[in-house]
Image (cartoon, rainbow, N blue to C red):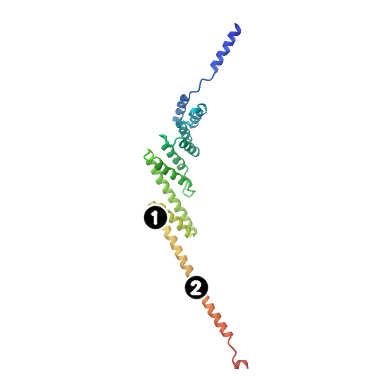
Amino acid sequence: MKKLIIYLCFALLAACAKEPPFDPVEKFKEAEEKMQKFKYEDARKAYQEIQEKAPDRSYDADIMLRIADTYYGEEKYSEALVEYQAFLNFHPVHRDASYAQYQIGMCNYQELTTIDRDPAVTRAALQEFQNLLVKYPGSPYDEEAKKYIAICKVRLAEYELYVGKFYHKKGSYQAAVGRLEKLLRDYPGYPAEKDALFYNGLSYQELYEAEISEARSRKRAGIRSRRKKRARRRWRSRTSRPLSSSSRT
């Protein structure tokens, strides 16, 4: 009897120590509360725990989107972009797909630096915002996307102006004209257009003056060459004349 009581006690203790069944709904609520408190890393761990312990929810749209939002909240834009793209790959027609597309544009936009740096990120942001307008027309993010599209174009125009002015100051006028005319062609009406026209005119003036100078140099060289030829002909004609009788005696 004593042994039976001991056994039952151990069984009861084991039952008490047993971990309660995992509740994904309760865990999701817990993660949401952490998000509201801006505890992004803790919230992400909670969302990921749902993915690990509730396999049927591994690609749940809300969880995937929240994980992306935790990275964005921590300003880890590269990681966030990957997660937003993964969301779109699995849920391209989800009600929040336009939000994910908008956030992809914002992840690129947040990485923008000064206009003297490679504008690849600016072009990427521009492309993603334009994708939003094309893929999800009439979304709640249209106006914001248009605003950022305009900003990106201004920055790209300023970059072309920066490069054009650099080439102009360097004396590479043909290269300057190429960049400045690209600006005028691709970004008409933007604030940088006025300066682009000015430096483009200066570059063309320098090219014109260089062409005139080269033409004059060629002309002078031609005149000198003709004079030399005439002088050689005269010299030859004189040295080839037969000596007169008086000079022979």
State left or right for residue 233 relative to residue 179.
right
- Provide the residue designation for mark 1: 194
Relative to 40, is 121 above or below? below
Which secondary structure, mark 1? helix
**In percent of the image, x 60 and y 93: which residue is there?**
245
Total tally of numbered discs in the picture: 2
Which amino acid lies under the numbered mark 1 shown in the image of this protein? Answer: Lys
Q: Residue 52: percent from the left, percent from the top? A: 52, 28
Q: Quadrant of residue 247?
A: bottom right
Relative to 53, is 136 above or below? below
**In percent of the image, x 54 and y 78: which residue is there?**
229
Q: Residue 77: percent from the left, percent from the top? A: 48, 39
State left or right for residue 97 relative to residue 221.
left
Relative to 127, is 182 above or below? below
Q: What quarter of the picture does the N terminus occupy?
A: top right
Q: Quadrant of residue 233?
A: bottom right
